[in-house]
Image: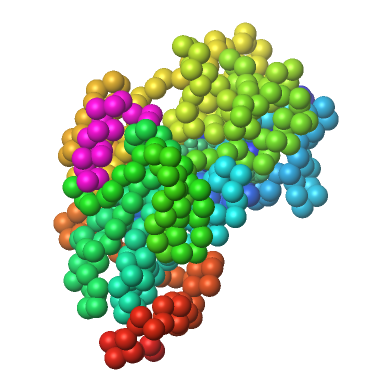
Amino acid sequence: MNERSKVIIIGGGFGGLSAAQALKSAPVDVTVIDRRNYHLFQPLLYQVATGSLSPGEIAAPIRGVLGRQKNTRVLLGDVEDIDPVAKRVLLADGASFEYDSLIVAAGSQTSYYGHDEWQKWAPGLKSVEEATTLRHKILYAFEVAERIADPTLRRAWLTFTIVGAGPTGVELAGAIAEIARQTLRHDFRSIDPKDAQIILLDASPRVLMAFPEDLAHKAVLSLAKLGVQTKMGTMVHEVTRDGISYQANGSTQTVSTKTVIWAGGVTVSPLAKTLAQRTGAETDRGGRIKVGPDLTVANFPDIFVVGDMAFSINKHGQPLQGVAQVAMQGGTYAAKAIVRKVKGKPKAAPFNYFDKGNLAVIGRAAAVANVFGVHLWGLPAWIVWAFIHLAYIVEFQSRLLVFIQWAIQDLTFSRGARLITGLAPTDFNFNHAVAAEERAVKPAVEKKSEPAVA
Ligand SMILES: Cc1cc2nc3c(=O)[nH]c(=O)nc-3n(C[C@H](O)[C@H](O)[C@H](O)COP(=O)(O)OP(=O)(O)OC[C@H]3O[C@@H](n4cnc5c(N)ncnc54)[C@H](O)[C@@H]3O)c2cc1C
């Protein structure tokens, strides 16, 4: 009896999971390898970072999602290398697996554009860990501000700066503004959370560059309504523990801010570099692997690259964005191409991305949406946004939980997952933070008015 064809999928994200699901009934043996044991619904990460949702509501164990798929096994492992000649995938723990066809969908990671030292003070939003770190940082800032007497320092703790005005930056800015203006409005005694300053920076001339101009304008109006200041055309120069400096209109300006969030961009996963070296594949400036119209690597028809790791173009020759839909459609296409090959059918037509549009939410019942070329904003856009996001969450149980959380939140403005958990990555020990800040401003602080430090 002939051995069944072996398909390895690296990554259980949007691209990898779609590919695996499309191979459900195929006469192949599928192995999905991911270094995490869960699929993460990244579009809702900002809601974990801002206390609306808990990590478990937006992540699903890959093993559980594919559990009923008899031809598929799931392995937890970090792929370190690929040998395209021997057709083997090598893991960091020394194991190696043979493939007949390979789908690489290892995604992307936060890019600090050569300034990785900023990461310490400006965490990104790409993983559950980063989302909970941000949640910690945001909520902690209000806690410290409540206990600091000096108005200048208080201001710095109550200033939140988001770098990057794409959908993630806009969504974060809107959500932090809602926390300050609504969620926390009754919770503090020494500070008024409404005094929080939320600043959104970007080097681009406008917010939401991937959206039509009229929708970007609507988004700016919605943000302004929430009290978010947008500063476009600003190039970040430095990020430190105490603030951020940027260049705008030829001059350098500094903002004292204790919370900087990096929503500034992504670069490919390190595996892309390795794959490019091993296959001699061309990459774009961001390191994405240039794939052909059939999403394979030049000279390696058995290696497909999909999602954020791939540089592919649409029928008009324009590069495809790093979004979930591109990854999902790419994964499904690669799977179907493999099935055709295994069944001895002629090659499929080139990959043709079907662009359904773009969505970004700004706040409660406020969003912008470009759906099939129809421009929506406000409540109608929010309804479309909510419906689509619920539809794409992989597990029914999570869908239901997210729906309930949103309903409660919209009626009460509360955020159920407003917990400060774990330790923040920097010197965020509470007493130390307050004491150090107070020392730093001596003698400006009046001892009498200082709240007691526990
Ligand atoms: C905060 C945020 C918000 C977003 N919002 C939206 C949105 O609203 N709409 C939208 O369309 N897109 C959005 N995106 C983009 C979207 O999430 C990505 O385009 C999509 O996840 C890309 O899919 P992928 O399969 O290429 O990678 P991913 O979904 O990132 O999956 C990659 C997988 O590979 C695994 N992996 C990586 N390296 C290795 C390795 N060496 N070994 C084993 N496993 C590995 C990872 O653990 C991960 O599970 C957002 C992204 C972020 C970060």
Residue at 80%, 33% (x, y): give it: 83
Q: Is residue 344 visible?
A: yes
Q: Position of residue 340 (x, y in %)?
A: 61, 16
Q: Is residue 145 above or below residue 346?
A: below
Quadrant including the N terminus: top right
State whether residue 98 appears in this view. no
The location of residue 400, given as percent across then percent down, is 31, 50
How many numbered marks does the figure carry?
0
Residue 284 belongs to magenta span: no
Q: Residue at x 17, y 39 (%)?
A: 379
Q: Which residue is rendered at x = 25% and y = 45% of the image?
A: 223
**Residue 58 percent location from the top left of the image:** 41, 51
Magenta stretch in the rendered image: 208-224
Q: How is the image coloured?
A: rainbow
Residue placed most toward the observer, 335 or 185: 185
Q: Of 386 and 223, which appears nearest the observer?
A: 223
Q: Is residue 252 left or right of residue 1?
A: left
Identity of the residue furthest to the top in this view: 346
**Which residue is most to the right?**
86
Left or right? Give the position of 73 relative to 175: right
Q: Nearer the viewer, residue 82 or 57?
A: 82
| Residue at 48% across, 46% down | 236
Q: Is residue 211 magenta?
A: yes
Residue extending furthest toward the front: 251
Answer with left or right where residue 15 lies relative to residue 274: left
Q: What is the x, y in percent for residue 38?
A: 53, 50
Image quarter hosting the C terminus: bottom left
Prevailing SS of the magenta stretch? helix
